[in-house]
Image (cartoon, coloured by chain):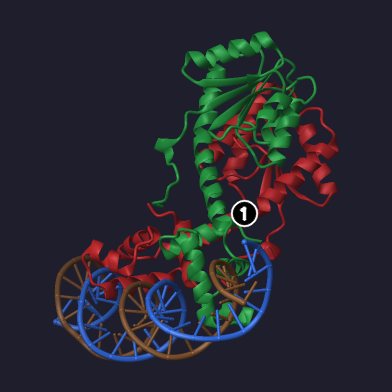
Chain colours: A red, B green, C brown, D blue
Amino acid sequence: MANAIPDDASQPEPLVIVIDDDDDLRGAIADLFLSVGLEVASYGAAAPFLATGIPNRPCCLVLDVRMPEESGLELQARLKSESRQPPIIFITAHADVPMSVRAMKQGAINFLPKPFRDQDLLDAVWEALRYERERWTRDQRLMELRRLASDLTPRELEILKAVDRGLLNKQIAHELGIAEITVKMHRSSAFRKLRATTASDFIRKVKMLELA
Amino acid sequence: MANAIPDDASQPEPLVIVIDDDDDLRGAIADLFLSVGLEVASYGAAAPFLATGIPNRPCCLVLDVRMPEESGLELQARLKSESRQPPIIFITAHADVPMSVRAMKQGAINFLPKPFRDQDLLDAVWEALRYERERWTRDQRLMELRRLASDLTPRELEILKAVDRGLLNKQIAHELGIAEITVKMHRSSAFRKLRATTASDFIRKVKMLELA
DNA sequence: CTCGCCTTCATACGCTGGTATAGGTGGGCC
DNA sequence: GGCCCACCTATACCAGCGTATGAAGGCGAG
């Protein structure tokens, strides 16, 4: 618990990313967010956004469904398949029920038909950012943990998988055909490398790694 | 793990519950499910369904949004507030985007505008039941656990809360102003009452109880 | 009042986990 | 060859957990 991972208090300011091919609307939306003190990045299509990459800070997407090249729904599916899932708010002038259901099933935070009231969009963004704050922190923690796990030796990983299954040191030793003391050695080495503080913290972190 | 809780193989057959005030459509939908071997219960309104209660078996709801008395969305909200949440598939002739978004945000599995193809409804029900199988098993396990927990003494509960916080027996003893051996006694008593098999199983079960 | 339950405590033993100390083996790299 | 690293082992010690045995006081129900 007492590691160098940023907690809620030290999170970077959130960023609202607007992607819409309608320049006027995009500008208006950006102004709306700026007027309430939110930082905004805006793009006219999916490609330039993907080119710059998802920023390493809490963010949410405001996405037009219908765009030239890659549609909003396609972008959503792509991000989902890449396991990079900032919350998404869809806006569209050509809304229909199946489209909205598909977007929501894939995890969108909201789906707003144009025209919408400014307040509705702001509410949706607040909700998205509330959600994102937790997701981002969890994500950062996991990335940090995976970074720490990256210099575990193969044998240490093997021991961790067994620990994850709830086996006793004795059982692990028997299963791997080595002495119990050796298991303890690898185990405590892994304990240190993962910066675990207590036994239960260790178990929690091992489970978090979701070892195959 | 080796307790008397039904696993996936011993689940009761699922039940599809259809609630729609249109008698003809309700009958047709019921026939559709019967034709693929699914059991069906159908109601003309929310009230008679609520009167009989949610059956103690895996089930899903096929719900008309617009009905006299209580609407489908109201029923969804009511079930949600009661923490009884079988998966819901909405069907409606008067669909609009905000309505579908609201339903999906509240956790609906799908939202089908009438008219829909039989296959779409069947697909949605398969998805709902796939989801429901896991939810139901988890639910049963939790209910069984709570049943076991119901004859813990007040002192045992107090010890479990401290265990949940990851405290050592020594620390718990100090906090409660009693001897460590007494803590061990209550702890092992609770261990037996919860039918825990191993230390990690015990921890898992304690966490599952979400003690205040 | 007696019985049963909840609570408390002491002594003592065994098992598990973790650490420290002190080695031995084999493989890859400069 | 020398060095580093991963891997393996042994002995010994300490702390925590769990259990067995034995014992005591309080308190409510029958």
Q: Quadrant of residue A100?
A: top right
Q: Is residue B24 above or below residue B190?
A: above
Q: Position of residue B144 (x, y in %)?
A: 52, 49
Q: Position of residue A72 (x, y in %)?
A: 63, 31
Q: Position of residue C5 (x, y in %)?
A: 56, 67
Q: Is residue A112 visible from the viewing direction of this image?
A: no
Q: What residue is rendered at 63% in x and 67% in y? A: B154
Q: Which residue is mark 1?
A: A136
Quadrant of the snapshot with the C terminus of chain B: bottom right
| Badge count | 1
Q: Please state if A84 lies on the left or on the right of C11 as rendered.
A: right
Q: Please state if B42 lies on the left or on the right of A78 as rendered.
A: right
**Front residue (pair D19, A143):** D19
Q: What residue is rendered at 70% in x and 31% in y? A: B103
Q: Secondary structure at mark 1?
A: helix
Q: Residues within 10 Å of mark 1 (few under 14, many from 20)?
A: many
Q: Callout 1: residue from which chain?
A: A
Q: Position of residue B173 (x, y in %)?
A: 57, 80
Q: Is residue B47 above or below residue A156?
A: above
Q: Is residue A78 visible from the viewing direction of this image?
A: yes
Q: What residue is rendered at 21% in x and 65% in y? A: A177
